Image (cartoon, coloured by chain):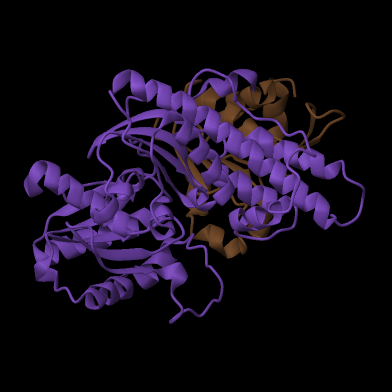
Amino acid sequence: MALAGALSRIARAGDVIALKGDLGTGKTVFARAFIRALCGAETEVPSPTFTLVQIYDLDDEETLHHFDLYRLEDPEEALELDIDDAFADGISLIEWPERLGSYLPRQHLEIALSYGGSQKQRSCLISATAEWDQRLAEVSL
Amino acid sequence: MIVLGIETSCDETAAAVVTDTGEILAETVLSQLDEHRPYGGVVPEVAARAHLEHIDRLVGETMSKAGTGFDQLEAVAATGGPGLIGGVIVGVMTAKAIAVAQKLPFIAINHLEGHALSARLEATNRVEFPYLLLLVSGGHCQLLSVEGPGHYKRLGTTIDDALGEAFDKTAKMLGLGYPGGPAVEAAAKHGEASRFALPRPMKGRPGCDFSFSGLKTAVRHAAMALPEGPFEERDIADLCAGFQAAAGDVLADRTAHAIDRFLQEHDKCNALVIAGGVAANQSIRQRLQKLADKQAIPLVAPPASLCTDNAAMIAWAAIERITASGPGAAEDGLDFRPRPRWPLDPDAPSAAFAGAKA
């Protein structure tokens, strides 16, 4: 979860972070660590599966949107969640970004989590567009 | 006293007309409506627009079914949060508009408060304060000490997934479809709970908080360890039974802790009330019944229609508030802002310690 902390330091308004991975690979654990790194270690971070999105206030009127699109059946439904405003106004963490189809912004950082060798291990594959590369270098990723 | 209640905080669009004697004059929940439903099946009302399309007709229909005129109402209440904000705004604005047009008080109700007080709606079975509430649904998993209208103390909450969510995800992993709760319960009926050793997260630890994310993951690991190919019916049954037993054990353990804490502050516990969609699960209910019997506390579960999201409990919570403090003090200003997060007990210590292992 050090990774989530490091990424939280370089994230800024307008960023979209797509969290991929099967059930139980740790998407929400990652999101929780990321949100707590920004909003304080005591922040309660409930799973957004049911409410689809949880919104957190950051400093300077910025917001952090934690989406879980697991229950969506049609990418169009995401538009109803004002997902485009969220992308514009702050940082967006998106679980199940596949559900967004073509509405996922081209500029985004993808974190793909999968099961590692043992039950306790997880592997993580980060893919990013060029704009992210320099920032990732800052935190030695 | 007659109050109109509106609930739009998640998937259901609902309206109800309720009296202060606890009589539900009329109640409409969109996901149960047969007429006017072009979709088929339960539609997740994720969209504010979906609520918006139906709310006017729904309110009108409910009022005429109740045979009540707007001039007979004492107040209009709507869920003011917590929930999906777009939906909440639709309900709140509708209620405010009616309040202004009909010169009625507008009352914003916390969705969790609605659940907390629903056990008092039925006049025949009214639970007296104080009591302990276990709210287990797709979106919430909390233990609350209910001391009176507006007086709640959160004893515990989930630090990750709600139990209903874990049920849904277990069902999905095993290919059982949605909604997952009833599917898992049906599959578990003929299963052997002891075949798979599933964890009991938090069991035995101090406090009353829950965690279900690890249980969900353990179900997945057990499922992946099975031979390749489609799941055997036997395997599904055993896994579901194992999951349900683990969930029941955890609920019972955490609730037992909550009863202890409750009794430290109150002379007696008038009831253990279970509400939320998961309260409909018979196996879970039996497990809690056993605990309640042991502690000599009555277990009370409101009828299923009041356990899941509904508008009657919103109207009822408003009635409780008016009864307790008078219509003037119960009223919310028209400047009330819908709240996506709205803890029932703002003083509750944060349940954040799970992050320590993350």
Percent from the top left, x then y, of residue A31? Answer: 60, 34
The mark total stands at 0
Q: Residue at x 61, y 64 (%)?
A: A74
Q: Is residue B268 above or below residue B335?
A: above
Residue with the most extreme right position = B228
Q: Residue at x 40, y 30 (%)?
A: A60
| Quarter of image, res B17 | bottom left
| Quarter of image, res B57 | bottom left
Percent from the top left, x then y, of residue A65? Answer: 51, 41
Instruction: Judge by depth and name the residue closer to the eye, B223 or B242.
Output: B242
Instruction: Judge by depth and name the residue closer to the eye, B345 or A33.
Output: B345
Chain B representation colour: purple
Q: Residue at x 62, y 23 (%)?
A: A5
Q: Is residue B200 above or below residue A128?
A: above
For residue B117, side relative to residue B306 (left or right)? left
Chain depicted in brown: A
Q: Is residue B57 above or below residue B29?
A: below
Quarter occupied by the N terminus of chain B: bottom left
For residue B277, side relative to residue B344 (left or right)? right
For residue B63, side relative to residue A23 (left or right)? left
Residue A75 visible in image: yes
Quarter occupied by the C terminus of chain B: top right
